[in-house]
Structure formats: C-alpha cells, structure tokens
Image (tube, helix red, strand yellow):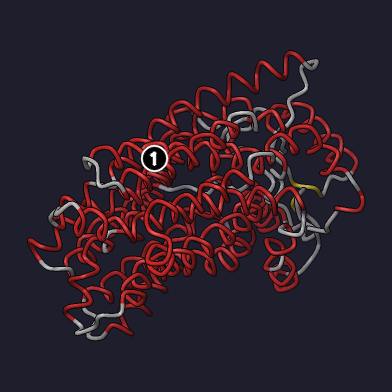
Amino acid sequence: MSDMTATEHNSEKAQANNASQDAVSKDPNIVDFEGPDDAENPMNWSPGKKTTQIIIVTTMTLLSPIGSTINAAATLDILKHFNSTNETVGTLVTTIFLLGYTFGPIVIAPLSELYGRAILYKICMLFFVVFNVACAVSDSLGSLVAYRFLAGVMGSCPVTLGTGSIADMVATEKRAGAMGAYIIGAVLGPAIGPVIGGYLAPAAGWRWTFWLMAIACGVMTAISILFIRESYPYVLLERKAQRLRKETGNMHLRSALDTGKTPSTLFAFSITRPLKMLLSPIVFSLSLYAATVYSYLYLCFTTFEAVFYGQYGFTSGEAGLATLGIGVGSVLGCVICGVAANAVSESLTKKHGGDPKPEYRLPPMILGGFCTPIGLFWYGWSAHAKVHWIVPILGTVFIGMGMVFTYMPSAMYLVDAYTVHAASVTAASTIFRCLLGALLPLAGPAMYDALGLGWGNSLLGFISIAFFPVPFILYLYGERLRNAKVFKVEF
C-alpha cells in the first residue's frame, strides 16, 4: 500500500502518467486516472479547491497546537484548584497532550492509508471536541491528565496528515510555499495558546480554556465535515475501481495502486512502518534533531510563568504574552524559510543539471544551527542577570526562528525523499518530536534548580550545537545513504 500522490513524483507527473497508461494498455483491468489532465487527480484540482483544502487543514493544525499549550499559563490555578503543589504534575497537565501526539500517529497514519485522509480528519476533530469538553468538566487532576492525553491523540491527526495532504495536491517545485503556510499553523499555535490562556483563565477560570477549545474546534469540525475532500490517490482509485466494478459487473477491475493485500494485512504492515522508517539513518537523524529543538519550545512554555510571573512580576496574562517572542520568531522563520527553500532548491537544481533532489531542501537548516543556540544563550543569561524583561523575550525570537529553520527543511526533505510514504514518514518524525516534547519539560524544573537559567539554557544550546553538522552530512551523503542497500528498510 502506498501513500502515493497522484501517479506521482509531481515534477515527473507526465512521465508517470504515461507509464501508467502503458500499464493500463497491457492490462485492461487496471483502473487509473484518465491521463495527466484527469480532473479527479488532486494534482489537477483548481487553485481555488486546493487553496480551500489547504486552509482547512492548516486551520485544524493551528487549533490543535493551541490546545496543547492553552492551559500552560493556568498551571498554578489548576494545581491550586485540585489542592496540589506538585510542579511536575502541573507540567504534565500540559505535556501529556504531546504524549498523545506521540501515540496518535502510530494508528492514524496507517488508517489514513486504508480509508483516506478526509474521514480521519472528520472523526478525529469530532473526538477532539469531545475530549476538550471532558477536560472542562474534569473533577480530579488524574481525570484531567487522562482526558488531555486522549485529546492529544485526536489532535495529532492534522499534524500527522497535513504534509501528506499538501503532497497529494501540490507539485514538488511549488510545495515550499504551501508547506510554509501549513507550518506557520503548526508552530504558531503553541505560542498563541499561553497568551489566550493567560488572560482567559484569570477572567473566567481555567475550565474556560478547554471550553473555548471545544467551541472553536466544534465550528472547525462542522466546516471539515462539509467541505474537506479526499485527496489520497490510493483511496480515490480504490473508490473508482469499486464504482466501475458495480457499473460494469467486471469483478477483475482493480486500482493501479492496489497491492493485492487484505485490509487487515495492510494495516498490520502499515502500523509498523513509521517505526521501521526511524531505523533509516536519514529519518532518525533529522527526526532527532527536529525533536530536540521542538522540545526546547515546550520547555520554554512550561517555565515562562516561573520566570516572568515569579522573577519579573508579570500577571498571568502578561506571562502568557512572553510567548509572543517565540511566535514572532516562528512567523519570521516560516516566511524567510519558505522563500529561501524554493530559491535555494531551484538554484541548486539548475546548477546540477536540472534534476531536483530532496537534499536541495537542506541548506536553510544551517540557519537553524545558528539561531537556536544564540536564542538559548541570549534568553538564559539575560534572564539569569535579571535585565529588562524585553531582552530575554528578544532572545526567544531566535529560538522560534531556529525551530522553524530546523523543522521546516527537515519536513520538506522527508516528504520529498519519501513521497510514496509521506504520512508514515511524518508520523515517524512526529512520534520522536512529540515524545521528547512531552518528556524533556518534565526535567525542566529540576535542571533549572540545579544549574540556574544561564547554565541550564546553555546546556541546551551546547546540545543543539552538536547537531550542527547534520544538514552538511545529509546534503553531501544523503542520496548515497538513501540508495545504500545496507540502510534499505522494507516500508
């Protein structure tokens, strides 16, 4: 079973369709798209239809990460309500959502490859609303943590499938712009959440942070049910084959992407695919790098209240506003990286004979290797020295930029390199990223108590510097590693 995007590999769509037509001429029972201009092929959808689908997916991807951090600024209120003083449990209320992000993709990715992306978006968003309501009415800290986990499982759907949806509809050479818009939602959401929660919780109570998520996502669920359309070619061709079998009575008709395996066999095989993909040195190294930088983001979110609320005397709402530094950095990073990624890739493609390669997506990642440690050193030591509050917030701008310069090129590289399995490779990367994002912040209070803000953040900065060679190594040897038999894993 493949996560194949429209008789595939986008920039070679014409050749792929010609080959597909040759296959059809050899076997009249093969059902495929009707040539390179078939309107049913998501690659040939109108610009308006593609834009609508991308906006819906991006909005869902924005709302889900907002839900991951909206309660961060209300942590002290939540602990007080449940008569607890355990800071680790308070942090867990926020980060357990990311643990749901870790486990959700393992099931969501293979299900999407069996039944399509659209149905998964609709079902998961509906249950995301249900579990946010459950959080809002929780009567114990344990039940709140449990419902947060389940909300994270459901909220992981757009984060897992979004890049695959874009790859279904947008050709490789035009993908950076669409990916940039999508990733803005993914990275801006966590920065917006604490701002909303910081003002809403003191005004209406911490439960309203979850009620607000339920209301907003309820509206988005209705929109997705009405307007989102299936874009996954495997499912589209399977439905076409089923329709033609019914119309013609020819039971031998089958999809061009059909592997002949039963759904249960396909699911059993696909559910392990993301974990198998992590065995690839390319997927492992990029996922670990992105996961490390991403976990710093949530470590900041879970410590901002202590730094700005405790040290600088901010109110709960003002402490939430401190996350806007990361938000501004994330937006700047998306804009710069979106422009640079296309320009660099096109330039390198022309320079090397016109053959586009996934490795041409990696040079912008070098900027992340600079921005992330600069931001961590700046934020840590300025907060340690207790200089004016704007100085550490300016440092977090670089943390936000560094995260995007790391995450966005790695995501585009993996989708371009493993387009056939875009959902699975995104799931593999998401599992790693969110596992670290959930667990590292739990060690944050102890680390900062032992090392202080200056050396604690410096330690994180030194770790990020250790990853600096990754884009250089993969740029030079990535293609060789992808093709090396010793690293081949049956996906």
Is residue 54 in view from this perspective?
no
Q: Residue 198: percent from the left, percent from the top?
A: 18, 56
User: Hey, which residue is sitting farthest front in the picture?
Assistant: 385
Q: Residue 214: percent from the left, percent from the top?
A: 25, 63
Q: Is residue 454 left or right of residue 175?
A: left
Closer-to-camera residue (231/392): 392
Which residue is at 53% across, 34% downward?
370
- Quadrant of the rendering where the N terminus is positioned: bottom right
Which residue is at 43% across, 43% downward?
377
Q: Is residue 424 left or right of residue 96?
A: right
Which residue is at 37% across, 45% downward?
381
Res 69 quadrant in image: bottom left
Residue 179 vertical placement versus 73 (above, below) = above
Res 197 quadrant in image: bottom left
Closer-to-camera residue (121/284): 284
Closer-to-camera residue (186/224): 186
Q: Is residue 56 left or right of residue 213?
A: right
Residue 27 vertical placement versus 148 (above, below) = above
Q: Badge 1, how many Cα within 10 Å: few under 14, some, many 20+? A: many
Q: Residue 118: percent from the left, percent from the top?
A: 49, 54
The three-letter amino acid code for the residue at tag 1 is Trp
Residue 379 vertical placement versus 292 (above, below) = above
Which residue is at 56% across, 47% downward?
464
Q: What element carries label 1?
A: helix
> Residue under circle 1?
378
